[in-house]
Amino acid sequence: TELGIYAAIYMVSDLESGQVISGKQLDSSLPVASLTKLMTVWTVLKHTESDEIVTIPNTRFETTSPSLGLSIGDKVKVKDLITSAIVGSSNDAASVLAFHVSEKVDLPFGELMNQEANNLGMKNSRFSNPMGFDSTANYSSAKDLQILVKKLDEANVFDFTSRAQSYSFQSESGKSYQTSATNKLINQYQNLYAIKTGFTNIALGSMINVVETSGRKYLLIVIGSPDREADTLKLRQDIMSR
């Protein structure tokens, strides 16, 4: 493109109105790696209270890095796991939340994710796991993620996470857990707000941010990029120069 964007899919839109300013392949489906955790969080929110206590199960939950290192039997709050999954993309947090909700409503979590995506009108998305690991049954589109982010934003999910460099909390037993932000741009740019990052070797880099300029907020979505940060900064520059 004329902006020199490497990503297979990108979109810049007005956060409030949803109006698309620029982009390509807006309805195309691609694997979105850990952007999937936004759907995980939305699904969890529909079935839990934020102060609800989750007991870390002794079943095999996902511990692939990045992870918090959750201890079996420890008791933690839903909101702490949600925040860790967003800020630090913690796989064990996403995995344990999914297990908790799945047990609670007695349905596979992937099925619940797809139900919720369907309810939101996310026509070009399918989800198979809460972490966003590569799978032919785990993909989304820019337009669908726009819908999801708007809903999460309206639920105030990003109020803390959008500028957080790290997050730490204690379990009921007093054990400390900590995660560092996967978004490395927010500490360099004051008007940039983190939504979520993603990366796998197959999906490549993906990233969602919000840029605030001239009193408006713009949603920046980058999917399938060999350099998600460079693409995001080009989109930021473009919207600020309009």
Image (tube, grey):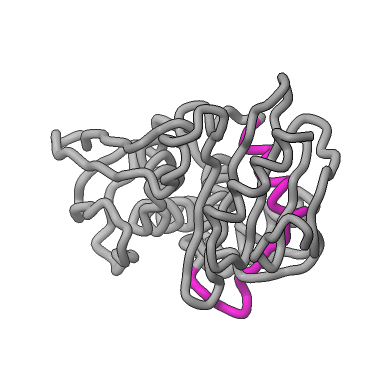
Residue pushed farthest left?
Answer: 174
Which quadrant is the C terminus positioned in?
top right
Image quadrant where residue 157 sits: top right
Q: Is residue 232 visible?
A: yes
Q: Is residue 70 above or below residue 186?
A: below
Give the side of residue 152 with respect to residue 96, left or right: right
Image quadrant where residue 238 sits: top right
Residue pushed farthest top?
Answer: 215
Image quadrant where residue 2 sits: bottom right
The residue sitting at 50% across, 39% down in the picture is 48
Question: Of 15 and 172, which appears nearest the observer?
Answer: 15
Q: Is residue 226 above or below residue 157?
A: below
Q: Is residue 123 visible?
A: no
Q: Is residue 174 above or below residue 136?
A: above
The residue sitting at 73% across, 55% down in the picture is 3
Give the side of residue 72 with respect to residue 139, left or right: left
Question: Of 59 and 21, which appears nearest the observer?
Answer: 21
Residue 24: where, in percent of width, then height? 80, 61
Give the side of residue 209 with respect to residue 56, left or right: right
The residue sitting at 47% across, 75% down in the picture is 201
Q: Is residue 135 above or below residue 131?
A: below
Give the extent of the magenta segment: 133-153
Residue 242 within the magenta-colored segment of the rendering: no
Residue 145 within the magenta-colored segment of the rendering: yes
The residue sitting at 70% across, 55% down in the picture is 117
Residue 232: where, in percent of width, then height? 60, 49
Question: Of 86 and 19, which appears nearest the observer?
Answer: 19
Residue 176: where, in percent of width, then height? 17, 38
Residue 95: where, in percent of width, then height? 40, 59
Which quadrant is the N terminus positioned in?
bottom right
